[in-house]
Image (cartoon, rainbow, N blue to C red):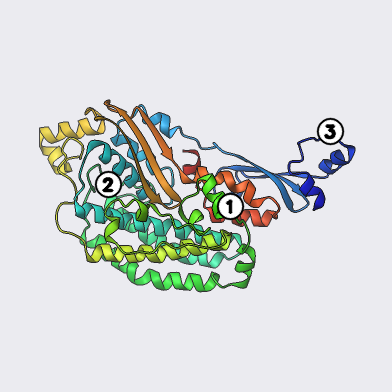
């Protein structure tokens, strides 16, 4: 290991000494990805190994880059919602709501309180689905398959609630500028209440299988450690930052959609290791359940969308029977209404951290410029630093605990 410390990057100064040259010839280059099942996405890591120890790593991204920001310059505002839910597809509604909030800030639309509460319910359901996938797959990567198969029934139940709200499951295209597409139906409320009753028992069972399991703890504690200072330097947000002990949460620091009306805690860790990231996401699911329950109990009366006919799609029954509604439907979808000149930034607390949209409008029918702050792209930069000096098996669980979503990473 002393030799490894001397040669932090084996390709620097390769020809300086014969001894160094001999050492480098003993190293192994290993491709982790882009289609390795343990990467859970299409991205590549080129690892330089000394036996089983990683001494260098280099990421390759862009395998599913779809030029979202460039496409946005040529598409009407309304059509971009469809692109947002292809990013972090584990929690699509949060992406949708983040984009709607951004455009609403530009347009100056005031969203009714009822619509804000419905959005909170949908976003917290999405957070649970996102964290459920991350934590259960982390368990799979340490050899515990049972928990993953068991908890998927509740992700399926959340998808059924999505279906009730918008007709879609994975890529939801949920909501509208100015509010929601439809109100909470009795069936949607019934399904949410079933989840609130049944899921806590299932989550407790999952935690009892994994949380204090000696094998899981040995595989995750003190693995993939990053300090609070280094995490902040990289620009970490979300569970990966809170696991280091920094209690930054967009919902608490810069409330949106009436999050200031709800009581919830911001869970934090201490070490910033893989185990802490698991614990933080686990506790956040409990907090999300609490927020959903509060929102349902205190759901305001009134409209579920703003009175903004220039930007909010008219009802379908009006479109089919009213010429003016049909014209507005066409104008909104095809971007025939100019937006005001302006420059706004709006962020939401996504499943992986601060999900932000920086929108510049020159008064046209599409954004002049749109910059997407995607959490995965930011914290994935720290991955090599977090795994150098560890083994390949440690790198797998570290990557899994970061929850890098390829669609969000490449955008």
Of labels 3 and 1, the one closer to you: 3
Task: Report the residue marked by disc 3.
Answer: 15
Of labels 2 and 3, the one closer to you: 3
Left or right: 291, with 5 as reference point: left
| Depth order, front residue of 48/174 | 48
Q: Position of residue 162 (x, y in %)?
A: 32, 54
Residue at position x 34%, y 50% in the image? 254
Cα distance between the residues tagged 3 and 1: 33 Å
> Which is more N-terminal, label 1 or label 2?
2
Mark 1 Cα-neighbour bin, 10 Å: few <14, some 14–19, many ≥20: many
Task: Report the residue marked by disc 2.
Answer: 175
Left or right: 339, with 56 as reference point: left
* Tally of numbered discs: 3
- Return the residue found at the far right: 18
Task: Determine whether the residue tagged by mark 2 lies in a helix, strand or loop.
Answer: loop
Mark 2 Cα-neighbour bin, 10 Å: few <14, some 14–19, many ≥20: many
Task: Report the residue marked by disc 1.
Answer: 399
Task: Determine whether the residue tagged by mark 3 lies in a helix, strand or loop.
Answer: loop
| Depth order, front residue of 46/255 | 255
Task: Determine whether the residue tagged by mark 1 lies in a helix, strand or loop.
Answer: helix
Of labels 2 and 1, the one closer to you: 1
Residue at position x 41%, y 46% in the image? 355
Q: Position of residue 348 (x, y in %)?
A: 36, 48
Q: Position of residue 211 (x, y in %)?
A: 54, 70
Cα distance between the residues tagged 2 and 1: 32 Å
Left or right: 387, with 52 as reference point: left
């Amino acid at each position: 290991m002393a030799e490894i410390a001397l040669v932090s990057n084996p390709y620097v100064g390769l020809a300086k000494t014969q001894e160094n040259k001999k050492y480098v010839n003993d190293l192994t280059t290993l491709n982790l990805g882009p289609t390795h099942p343990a990467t859970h996405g299409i991205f590549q890591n080129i690892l330089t190994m000394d036996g089983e120890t990683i001494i260098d790593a280099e990421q390759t991204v862009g395998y599913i880059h779809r030029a979202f920001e460039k496409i946005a310059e040529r598409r009407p505002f309304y059509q971009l919602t469809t692109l947002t839910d292809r990013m972090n597809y584990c929690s699509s509604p949060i992406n949708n709501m983040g984009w709607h909030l951004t455009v609403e800030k530009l347009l100056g639309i005031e969203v009714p309180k009822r619509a804000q509460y419905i959005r909170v319910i949908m976003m917290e359901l999405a957070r649970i689905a996102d964290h459920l996938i991350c934590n259960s797959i982390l368990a799979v990567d340490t050899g515990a398959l049972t928990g993953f198969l068991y908890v998927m029934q509740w992700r399926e139940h959340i998808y059924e609630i999505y279906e009730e709200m918008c007709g879609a499951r994975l890529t939801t295209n949920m909501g509208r500028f100015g509010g929601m597409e439809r109100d909470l139906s009795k069936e949607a409320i019934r399904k949410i209440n079933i989840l609130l009753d049944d899921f806590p028992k299932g989550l407790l069972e999952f935690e009892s299988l994994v949380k204090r399991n000696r094998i899981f703890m040995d595989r995750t504690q003190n693995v993939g450690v990053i300090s609070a200072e280094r995490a902040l330097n990289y620009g970490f947000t979300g569970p990966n930052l809170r696991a280091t002990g920094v209690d930054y949460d967009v919902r608490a620091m810069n409330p949106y959609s009436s999050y200031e009306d709800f009581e919830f805690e911001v869970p934090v860790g201490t070490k910033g290791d893989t185990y802490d990231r698991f614990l933080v996401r686990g506790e956040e699911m409990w907090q999300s359940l609490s927020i959903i329950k509060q929102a349902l109990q205190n759901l305001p009366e009134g409209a579920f969308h703003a009175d903004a006919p220039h930007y909010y799609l008219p009802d379908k029954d009006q479109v089919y029977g009213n010429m003016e509604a049909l014209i507005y439907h066409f104008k909104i979808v095809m971007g025939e209404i100019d937006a005001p000149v302006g420059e706004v930034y709006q962020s939401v607390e996504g499943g992986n951290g601060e999900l932000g949209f920086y929108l510049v409008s020159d008064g046209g029918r599409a954004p002049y410029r749109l910059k997407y702050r995607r959490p995965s792209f930011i914290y994935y930069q720290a991955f090599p630093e977090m795994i150098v000096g560890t083994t390949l098996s440690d790198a797998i669980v570290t990557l899994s605990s970061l929850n890098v979503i390829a669609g969000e990473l490449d955008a």
